[in-house]
Image: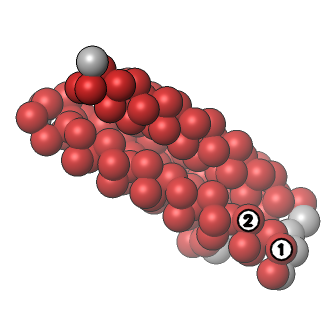
Amino acid sequence: MSTPTIALGIALIVVGAAITVLSGSDSITSLIPAFVGVLFLVLGLVARWRPTIGRHLFHAAAALALLLVLGSVGTLVGRGAEGWALASQVGTIALCGAYLVLAIRSFLAARRAREA
């Protein structure tokens, strides 16, 4: 799962940077996906470097992805968004949601392999 975690990190960094540049935003909040992307990138790289703790790092990454999905959905529902903010939140939800699906499938496959 290190490769999808690293890929998610890079994708979120790109989303945050692209939205900031394209929108001409001078607000630090437009870079939130990029900041979180750095966390995913670090988690994935450390998991490659220290495979013995990879399982724990992937659980942390999955929890972080879940928080991002819930936070972005909550913001959309609670305050609403439009324009570039909407694009950023939808991108974050889609990327982290897809990662969560991969993570859950991976966790289930690992459990089945241990039980077999």
Q: Quadrant of the N terminus?
A: top left
Let me know if residue 11 appears in the view.
no
- Asked whether disc 2 touches disc 1, contact meaning CB atoms under 8 Å apart, the reply is yes
Residue under the image location 33 percent in, 54 percent down: 60
Residue toward you, 104 or 80? 104
Percent position of residue 91, x then y: 71, 46
Viewed as shown, does residue 4 lie left or right of 78? left
Percent position of residue 103, x then y: 46, 36
Helix, strand or loop at mark 1: helix
Percent position of residue 87, x then y: 80, 52
Above/below status of 100 relative to 20: above
Query: What amino acid type is highlighted by mark number 2?
Result: Val
- Residue furthest to the front in view is 116
Q: Quadrant of residue 51?
A: top left
Q: Which residue is mark 2?
A: 73
Viewed as shown, does residue 94 lie left or right of 115? right
Residue under the image location 72 percent in, 73 percent down: 74
Viewed as shown, does residue 12 lie left or right of 42? right
User: Dot 1 surroundings within 10 Å: few (below 14), some, or many (20 or more)?
Assistant: few
Percent position of residue 30, x then y: 64, 64
Q: How far separated are the C-alphas under marks 2 and 1?
A: 6 Å
Residue under the image location 82 percent in, 60 percent down: 86
User: Dot 2 surroundings within 10 Å: few (below 14), some, or many (20 or more)?
Assistant: some
Helix, strand or loop at mark 2: helix
Residue under the image location 90 percent in, 65 percent down: 82
Above/below status of 85 relative to 18: below
Q: Quadrant of residue 9?
A: top left
Q: How many marks?
A: 2
Q: Which residue is mark 1?
A: 77
Residue toward you, 17 or 12? 12
Viewed as shown, does residue 95 lie left or right of 35? right
